[in-house]
Amino acid sequence: MKSILKTIALILITTGLRAQNIVGEVEYRYKIFYDKIYSSLPHLTQQEKDRILLSWGNPEGYSTRMKLQFWPEKSLYTYGAPYEVRSYSWQVEDYFIENNLEEQTYLKYMDQMGKTYIVRDSLAAPKWRVMNEIRDILGHMCMKAVSEDSIKGQKITAWFASDIPVPVGPEEQFGLPGLILAYDINDGMLVVEAEKITFGEPAEIIALPKKLKGREVSGTEYQDLVQDFIQTSIESKRAWVWGLRY
Amino acid sequence: MKFFLSFLLLLAITFASQAQSKLTIRGTVKDTTNLPLDYTSVLLLSPKDSALVAYTLTNKAGEYQFKNVDRQPLLIKATYMGYLPVQKELVLPETDVLEVDEIYLEPILQELYEVVVKAAKAPLMMRGDTLEYDASKFKVPPGATLEDLLRKLPGMQIDANGNIVAQGQQVQKVTVDGRRFFGGNTKMATQNLNAESISKLQLFDDKSEQSKLTGVEDGVKEKTLNVELKEEAKKGGFGKISAAGGTDERWTANGSFNKFDDVNQFSVIGYGNNVNQSGLSWDDLQEFRGSNAFQFGDTGDFGFNGSGGMNYISFSGGDNEESFEIPFNNLNSGFSNNQAIGVNYNYLKGKKDFSTNYFYSRSDQILESVNSRTNFLQDNTSFTSTDQSVQNNVAGHHRANLRFQNELDSANTITINAKGRLSTLSTLLLSHQELIDSSMEQSQMDRNNQSDKWSGAFQGTAIYRHKFKKNGRNFAASISDTWSKADQDGTQKAIADMMDSTDPNSYFQSLDQVIEALNGSNLIKSSLLYVEPIKKVFFWETFYNFSQSTSETNRQVYDVERSDIRELNPDLSRFFDNKITYNRFGTSFRYANKGSNLSVGLAASDYRLNGQFSVIEGSEILGRVDKNYFNFTPNVSYWKTMKGNKRINASYAMGVTPPSIADLQPYKDISNPLYIREGNPDLEPQVSHSFNTGYNMYDPATFINLQFSFNATFYQNQVVQNQTIDPETLVTTYKAGNVSGGQRYYPYVGFGFPIVKTKANAYLSANPSYSKSFSLINSIETETHTYSHNFGGNLDLTPLEWLSLYAGGSYRLSKTNYEQNPSQNQDIINWTVYSNINIKFPKDFYLDVKFNHNRYKNESFGFDQKVPILNASVYKLLGEAKKWEIRLSANDIFNKNQTISQYAGQNYVSTGRIETLARYFLLGLTYNMRGIEVKNRR
């Protein structure tokens, strides 16, 4: 799988043709449904689940705008401009993902589990299963692919556009024969969907902070931390979604 | 382009080169007109789970090539924009090269792609030769039938006879969820099925009925339309009912039922008991109110507040007569008999949100109490009065709430709130008071007061919010009106000690009076807010508040001369007519960026107080108030959220509180002959300067949390009640006055940490506080210092799945020091220890034990009261689905329950004790439709 990604990257870089389709910027709506996530916690009784959905159910979810910039050799991903300009500011968390397709490595700089982590490792695509279903997103015909995250207990359904042959996507999703324009987790607990695609060199390239301050870990070390965090949260009957990106 | 494609061919896919049993797979992709398709994605999948094995793109000649593919069963799949993806299984050759037959991609029917995939945004699914899509994505009017829906779908026609024609062929049969519908009568199905209940439509060629019966393939295919109905998963209901009876005729019962779907939420709830529970539990209240349980920002008050810091929303519970809110978490003192019933309905559709509820609660309460109050006189002497009383309160409250919110469009939202309350309250008080004084003989008085009261109130609020096109520019306006009326009739009878009854200066006086009081008030409020963003991180906020409250108090007191003759008492009867008008205009600049928030603001406020009073309405005006107070109030606040869930904040606010009109009226209120109140027309408004600062952090990985805060308030012109105590009659006269120099300091620190992660957690807190207050007592300035030392600790142990233990304690020492009279200094101590253990035994048996120990101590009076309360219950869940519970509970096993209060004021100390429901046992049964909830963890 790794070599496929590398080869595709090479093909696209070295030719540089059809550049209008292999370089660009995507704005995604990251829409999370805390009520659904919360009411799926294993320690809750049916009555508690109903109570959560009844009294603080939010059919609209909570939206954040995210931004992905892609080239044949790399992708950059972070927060986009907020939907609503508010006269107060809460957000201080950093969330950057850089995938280097040439070297087959990634860098994640993010505030998770109460700390800032700098995660570097080589890219390892999840096991994708390509399904027989198509859908249109912003004028691109997308195919369905599914995978699973056993640590987080997530069923991932992604839609990739094979006419944008860059194997990247939003959040931690990548490795399909086309740009991932949408994905959802556990049938709608999280829905990430492209809202705008602009082809061509982005006007302002996402810049990582000059100095990365945080704990340097490898991908496997980070996965162990995540696993431990989720395990502890479940044992303490807490929802891990408050400390860890869903 | 040419270069690219040839390059691609040359390059192809280079896998690690262990070439032996590896395959090279190549072929061509074309469209149905035999033209090669370039730039087409070709995927190799594993047939057992569709796992992606490899992929590439075709070149200009539509050619693709995979090299070094592991020998394994494979599917090949080609996909191109606007074409139906094609997939087929590969037959692996003996050789190392597989030439795949040409793949022909069929364009998706233009109409299908445009209408289904693009316009309706419905995913198109390919299952063999069946194309399936989500019909619920097509908008149809409410009440539309399947036929109406079919007319909208591409490739479908309904002919004049009502037959369905799909892709040019007549549909022979319609099945619903795979089953034949009404003997294959297609019209019956299309005209009777509701379009809104359909989730998916599938069109395929099915075997004929004949071949299905015989099992012999006759080659005849029937065009079949299968209709999949929506799973109405969100529709549901739950409810529970519970009843228990026990010793001393104790009983309790409650029940609730909820029914809901996507749009409607309906619930009813009710309870009855004589074990002092006079409100819903927090969980029951949430379930009862449903989507309406949490509504913030409904007050319509805009602009910064005078106390500094953030606006916190707190849920305190209780049952307040004046409140529109449904009572919850309320445990009565004394003995009470309580009933309530409520009904709630919420309607949520799109951007419209409607909620309404009605709640009636009634409580019949008996309070037997003993109160003692020691007043200090300036000559180091004191006198003590005791009051032994029995009180019966019967209160009933009808409360109704209605809320409507409509998001008209993305820019405009309207919220309307209407609340109403109608209450009746009758009280009967029998009391025996005694006065113990070193210089006087003991005297006593018996009182008998009765009153009946009804009161009603209504509040209506409308809030309009508008977001301008410019992101961050907002406008909001609110208007509200609160109207209330109360009518009280009562009698007051007192028989004082015979010896002193003729002495007008005696502490206790005999009286026989009838009181009629009619009070009414109206409060109009309106607020405006405008926020203008400047360069994304700066905001300019402007607000205006207006309020006007008018109130009328009409209290008529009649002396009963004989059983049939009543005479108006002109000293005690009063008619007040007051009006307070408030205007505030303010502005603030805010900076909000990357978690940092700074706001600097200034407001100009103006209070106008008008009032007049007379003996009865229309009689000679006895006094007037006409005051105007104008102030500028600055406000500064800062908070910053930092990485790692840390937050700091600091703020300063100036608050201005005008004196109450009652304190301003040049009038002596002698309605309570022992405590006379006198107005002071020269009062200035009280000004407070509040400084708040705090820090808190929480680490989600280690569960360590730390909270620290420090609040300080300094008063200017603090309104205090100066006292003059007549040494002969011991009558206290209160007169409001202004004094500066009062201070209050309130630090808090709390620290929570796990001892053993997920098994044992601890939380420690300390909040010492200090306050300094001044007042004039018999014209001498007295200074009172109150130190409160408050320490607490909690321990949560959840070592095993079946065992949890919670324990904690708190210690509070209130030291009241009198600067001018140190010999009267008071040390009041409260100790609290609690523990709660919950054990799950095999076979669904549970044990729950709670132990609370309170100790109240005041050494200078030799007061030392311990109240140990032990509650225990065992319960068992019954039935397969654990819907039943049987529970035996013992309350206050030691039979020690009573309600104790202690307080040290500026020149007095009081203690009180209420006899409260003590030991009882209950045996009860609960049925919960959704299974019993076991709360063995917090």
Image (spheres, grey):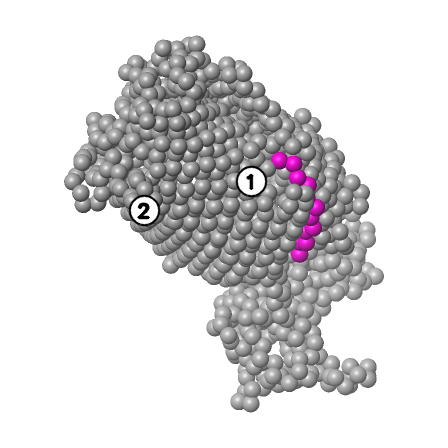
Q: Is residue B922 visible?
A: yes
Q: Residue at x 53, y 44 (%)?
A: B278
How many numbered tags mark residues here? Answer: 2
Position in image of residue B901 (x %, y %): 50, 27
Residue B82 falls inside the magenta stretch: no
Circle 1 Cα neighbour tier, 10 Å, few/some/many (<14 / 14–19 / ≥20): many
- Name the chain under label 2: B
- The vertical placement of B693 against B538, above or below, is above
In front: label 1 or label 2:
2
Residue under label 1, please give it: B335
Mark 1: amino acid: Phe
State the residue in front, A154 or B445: B445
Residue under label 2, please give it: B564
Secondary structure at badge 1 equals strand
Q: In the figure, is residue B128 to the left or right of B581?
A: right
Position in image of residue A237 (x %, y %): 66, 40
- Name the chain under label 1: B
Looking at the rendered structure, which numbered label has been put on residue B533? none
Circle 2 Cα neighbour tier, 10 Å, few/some/many (<14 / 14–19 / ≥20): few
Q: Residue at x 58, y 65 (%)?
A: B123
Tell me where the magenta segment starts and ends, as one range. B918-934
Q: CA distance from mark 1 to mark 2?
A: 36 Å
Which image quadrant for residue B449?
A: top left
User: In which quadrant of the rendered image does the C terminus of chain B lie?
Assistant: top right
